[in-house]
Amino acid sequence: MKRQVRASNLMLHSITRVVTFILLAFSIYLFFAGHNSPGGGFIGGLMTASALLLMYLGFDMKRIKKALPFNFTTMIAVGLLVALFTGVSSMLFGYPFLTQFFDYYDLPVLGNTELSTALPFDLGIYLVVVAIALTIILAIAEDDS
Amino acid sequence: MNNLLVLPFLIPFAVGAILILFSKHIGLQRFLSGLTAMLMLGVAIYLLSVVRTEGVVVLEVGSWSAPFGIVLVADLFAAIMVLMSAIVGLLCLFFAFRTIAPEREKFYFYPFYFFLLTGVNGAFLTGDIFNLFVFFEVMLISSYVLIVMGGTNYQLRESLKYVVMNIFASILFIATMAFTYAVTGTLNMAQLAERVAELEQVGVLNVIAMFYFIVFGMKGALFPLYFWLPRSYYGPPAAVAALFGGLLTKVGIYAIIRTFTLIFPHNQEFTQPILIWVGAITIVIGGLGAVSNFDFKRILSYHIVSQVGYMVIGLGLYTSLAIAAAIYYIVHNIIVKTALFLYAGTAQRITGTTDLKQMGGLLKTHPLLGWMFFITGIAIAGIPPFSGFVSKLSLVVSSFETEQYAVGGIALAVGMLTLFSMIKIFMYVFWGEQKHTKAQGKTKVGDLLLPAIPLVILTTVLGVAAQPILSFFLEASNQLLDPSIYIDSVLKGGGA
């Protein structure tokens, strides 16, 4: 990249370190808020992608690639399959495709929590959104060099 | 409830996702995709037999009952279309094995091929107009990738137009759905049909109907929105062009037939002349384009435009026989057009060009290709005993029955143009002096023609066994002409 000058930008570095965590935490909150209130896999995924992008901007690409050694294309496929499997799993029990189930459980730390099959579906969406957003933006960024 | 309905688009979707993981293993990709395409053909045949015996099959996805959730509906017409897409998908895939460059294969050709089929099959099966939009988008986005893949100058220029055109159509589509929802308060096709019937399809509902016609007409390459097709289908490799030429425009036509038989059939005085005359102008323009061009693939592309017109005329005439003829035409055209594009690819493999003036004498070195082209060419021109004859005959008969003599005459006259342009290809490419080198003359194309052989057999069977097949299509068209069958099975019988 041409703009590796930024790698020595102290302000950006320090802010990135703090803001990334806020963004990631908020994205996780959004992810779990999903399907009954505003939030969910899509918006959570976008938020995570923006946090990761901030890291790419703040530091140089090589270092982040070392820190996040994911192949994003594989991640798209995995996300698609996770979402798809959630839909298919209801078919295995004789319900229509994509039927969702939920129940309330008493979990140790969280207390009375709703667990639903929409969650793994959202997880799949989350993975796909993060991976696609980063694939597109990184492809454009790498084109620059 | 029958989960069978999700399989035609669930299988290609899942396999497409799995194939992304193995993008570098070409052998494994081919094996998996070949197996999947065969499985899809099996599923499609089974689906058709189930629909034939049990009537309209409905699935309420996610157990949300209609009209609140999304429903999948398979009537005979939809099941026939799913079967056609499975056949074309299988054969074009096997053609692609032999012709697609390994760079393309590594660059996610197969995943997007299957995502395209996901979109196509989903569009055929959905019973919700918003869901139709979603599957259209799945189909279009995959088609953008397939059409631009390889990235030659020509491809990039033409696919930009293709993309812009389709994005505009999609925007219009979604705006039209907003109007639809504002007027009727529903997007479930069955409930929409009920409410449009209650509101008596006047005023704003006619405007909405025309908007749908424009949107699907853009995708189906109807006059005057056909101009993108001949150029953009010229760029991609033959396997992709065959898949697009055979299948994609027909999805638009399917959507037109679905909306204008189910939702907007109540104001025939208004819609009938529009459908018929747009169809008639389309066939004339397409026919003239085919006559005036001197390139194998371009002629075929203009034929797509021309033939799409016949289908819309069939819908416009709106009798049982006419719609059966339209279905016949769609089936015939999918088979024949795919085969012709495969020949174009094969001839290009031999001679290295698709320009008619630089080809010649192929009949001497490759007789099989020549005669297979001959059969398919006269089939598309409507000469008995092949499938084109029956479809054109029943269309012309029904146009005379409804006293639309002018349209019947145009259909017959343009048939001559089609025949003329097919003979032109045959004369330039297969007769005359051999213009390719001896080394090129020895190119072996047997394995390239293999995928086209089932298509030649199918067009012959469709023509020879016209009686049972036409009566089967009449069954399908009667189902389309009586929307209450569709509406009742979605809104009343679906929950069982």
Image (cartoon, helix red, strand yellow):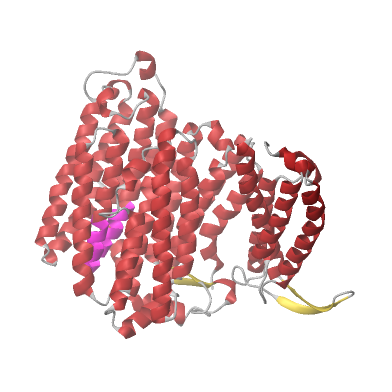
Question: Residue B292's quadrant in the figure?
Answer: top left
Instruction: Give x and y (percent) for residue B8.
Output: 51, 58
Instruction: Give x and y (percent) for residue B261.
Output: 31, 70
Do we see residue A60 in this rendering? no
Query: Where's the C terminus of chain A, which quadrant?
Result: top right
Do we see residue B99 in this rendering? yes
Q: Is residue B318 left or right of residue B32?
A: left
Residue drawn at point x = 38 percent, y = 38 percent: B452
How many numbered callouts?
0
Residue drawn at point x = 61 percent, y = 48 percent: A136
Vertical side of B303 occupied by A90: above or below: below
Residue drawn at point x = 22 percent, y = 24 percent: B431
Instruction: Name, please, the residue furthest toward the top.
Output: B438
Q: Is residue B172 left or right of residue B468?
A: right
Vertical side of B450 occupied by A119: above or below: below
Instruction: Give x and y (percent) for residue B327.
Output: 30, 59
Q: Is residue B106 left or right of residue B205?
A: right
Instruction: Give x and y (percent) for residue B193.
Output: 37, 77
Instruction: Name, please, the residue furthest toward the right.
Output: A108
Residue B465 falls inside the magenta stretch = no
Front residue of this view, candidates A96 and A4: A4
Residue drawn at point x = 26 percent, y = 57 percent: B311
Residue bounds of the magenta highlight: B310-331
Residue B320 falls inside the magenta stretch = yes
Q: Is residue B406 left or right of residue B459?
A: left
